[in-house]
Amino acid sequence: MAIFNKKKQKETPAAANVWARPEMAVTFKAEIMPGRTREERTFRIKSVHSNGRVVLHDFTGEHREGAFEPINFLRDSVK
């Protein structure tokens, strides 16, 4: 009887779903800050809230993941 043999889905801890970490660099999308270079749109994360929003150093407010360019860990690597 397959009805009674349902497998439990593994729950992932909340920490595994976090998209950002403190002191990590993030870059706002160009549409949000038009006319600025990538360097002018890049900030460091001060803290990450439990709802996934971040507070930045030297920039006011809380911001969500959608406001930033996708994270590319190879962008700053040496070629």
Image (cartoon, rainbow, N blue to C red):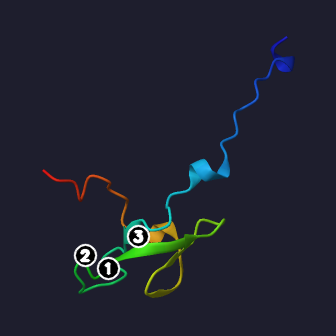
Quarter placement of the N terminus: top right
| Residue behind mark 3 | 68
Please tell me which residue lies in front, 67 or 13. Answer: 13
Count residues near mark 3 (Cα–Cα under 10 Å), then give few for <14, some for 14-19, many for 20+.
some
Q: Which of marks 3 and 2 is nearer the N terminus?
A: 2
Say if mark 1 contacts mark 2, CB within 8 Å. Answer: yes
Query: SS class of the residue under badge 1?
Result: loop
- Give, as a three-letter code, the residue at label 3: Phe
| Residue behind mark 2 | 38
Quadrant in which residue 8 is drawn: top right
* Residue 7 locus on image (x, y percent): 76, 24
On screen, residue 58 above or below 11? below
- Give, as a three-letter code, the residue at label 1: Arg
Q: Nearer the viewer, mark 3 or mark 1?
A: 1
Query: SS class of the residue under badge 3?
Result: loop
Residue lying at 42% horizontally and 65% vertically, measured from the top left: 24
User: In screen coordinates, is 78 left or right of 11?
Assistant: left
